[in-house]
Amino acid sequence: MTAIYKHELHSYFNNLSAYVFGAFMLLFAGIYTAVMNVQVGVANFEYSIQAYTFIFIVTVPVITMRIFADERRQRTDQLLYSLPLSMSKIVLGKFFALLTVFAVPVLVMCIYPLILSAFGNVNMLSAYATILAFFLLGAALLSIGMFISSLTESLAVAAGVTFVAMLLNYFLSNIADYLPRTAYASFIGFMLLIVLLAFVIRQLTKNTFVALIVAVVGEAALLMLYNVKKPLFTGLLPDLVTKLSLYEAFQKIPGGMFDIASIVYMLSVTVFFVFLTVQTLEKRRWS
Amino acid sequence: MIEVKHLTKKYGDFTAVSDLNFSIETGCIYGFLGPNGAGKSTTMNIMTGCLAATEGNVIIEGHDIFEEDMEAKKLIGYLPELPPLYLDSTPNEYLKFVAEAKGVAKADIPAQIDRVVELTGLQDYRKRLIKHLSKGYRQRVGIAQAILGNPSVIILDEPTVGLDPMQIIEIRDLIKKLGEDHTVILSSHILSEVQAVCDTVMIISHGKLVACDKPENLEKLFADANTVELTVEAGVQEAEAVIASVEGITSSSSEADGEGRTRLVLRTELKDEGDDQLCRDLFFAFAKAGKAILQMTSAKASLEDVFIELTTKPEAPAEEKAGSEAAAIADKLAGPAEAKEAHN
């Protein structure tokens, strides 16, 4: 794992992408701090961070697009497969290198509250908790980007799909507001989701029978639940969509509440997508 | 020792490798020969753990590549069809990464890299970016990567494709040198290469092993198809009349080239004294008839003939166990050989 980690880190710094990424992150962090804290005169650094999270929409696709897509494009994935390293070690080595590159600008940002404290009363605890949450949010989004990169061998596709995924994630709670809140609408929405799930199962396993069973059992259970506990469905879909948003989970922390559930959610998303990446790469050997 | 048992690989409905069986002894150079799409690369990818098989096992010195992949992979050095190089790094950096990933002890890494760099002749290119290296040198970096960590088995997929003649000779010499203390398996669709380098040739066609033997043995199997080509200063009928008086010709074809010459292709059964006797007989027969022989060449069946014969018949001999006797193959080949003669 250390060999992969060192090699990845070396290539991030060698081809300048680590510098460009760090500089871009810090440039916007600086602008937001200058505007929100210095110009407007607010002492809360967490507000700057909160406003600044949109930066991931741009930076995550750029830094993660190469991670596996480029290995496949250059056929170096064959080397990785033939080395005596397990797939999880390869993925973790790469992911930790990515986190290290991301940690550099975050560490620099840790100085900002100290600088600001020279001019006013900064709530240090809240500021640093937000920086930590910012790092975890970034890690979760980077793991999504890495997963998308493992699906394709085209850098453009990896970057494009990740960009859309980041955008969707950012606006997920806004989208949820437009969803109708009636029980019936949620019911229809879930029905469609079950069909979608069955379709995905069909695509992944090439097993129509299992997919059909999932669809039929799922729809039947949903119908029963809807008839028995109709009030449960009121606003269920929009609430669920809002809950899924990583940004929504993050928002609570700059608000002054160190929400353990949010932290756990961001960590679980990270672990989940790292796991999915390992599975995707394992699966490729079997196809 | 590598054992491949009942190896099958299917891509959807397409069967790339079908029930392949062979075993490879330690310390020889083996050549995988087959036309494009015969399943050479697929087999090699499976043997190195890059690809999973649909069915069957690959056992490398007692370690199953699917069950104990870490142990098995440590014993193998693999150069895929396209050398897997990080173009933005230098050979030094790249080899250091591979050595670390292969788990070479930290203290041994510099010495190991020096050794493979010297073997592959990369001394002057250690600090250049790989993207600035020519194809031949990239191939060398790929080979250097494969032999790092001193694996007992080295698998090279088409190691000389796209190289210039000088480089091909150098790479072949390198492979021969490696064969002295490693088991080397290489694939190729170039016959002369396999003939020049390998101790044992395995011919694969349509995902099946159709022959496995020493190159000279394979040629002998087809020695009954020896041919003599000659051009004589005579009309077709005159020439055929002369040939009729010569013994030992099993079939002949002739064509006039329009300038009073005739080109003949004769086939003969192999006799103990070889086909020299036929040439001698032909010479005296034509001399007696007062016709000049302008050109005469006798050709043994080359590995090329064997290859074409074996790989153009999809229904031809099924898989053959490695190391089996030449006679067994000869029996199987009798069918197609006869068919060829009848055709003539």
Image: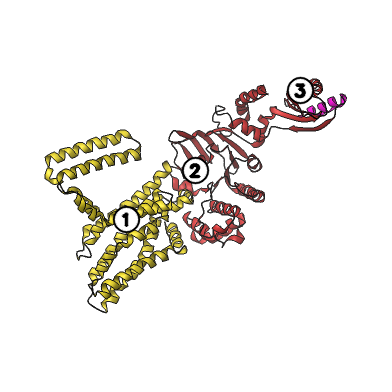
Chain colours: A yellow, B red
Nearest the camera: B278 or A236? A236
- Crowding at dot 2, Cα within 10 Å, few <14 / some 14-19 / many 20+, comes out as many
In the image, which is nearer the foreground, mark 1 or mark 3? 1
For the magenta stretch, what is the residue range?
B274-289
| Residue located beneath label 1 in the image | A166
Give SS at disc 2. helix
Number of marks: 3
Q: Is residue B129 visible?
A: yes
* Mark 3 lies on residue: B248
Mark drawn on residue B45: 2
- Protein chain holding label 1: A
In the picture shown, does residue B179 fall above or below B315? below
> Mark 3 is on which residue type?
Gly
Crowd tier of the residue under label 3, counting other residues whose Cα lies within 10 Å: few below 14, some 14–19, many 20 or above:
some
The picture places residue B146, in percent across and down from the top left corner, at: 54, 51
Amino acid type at circle 1 is Met
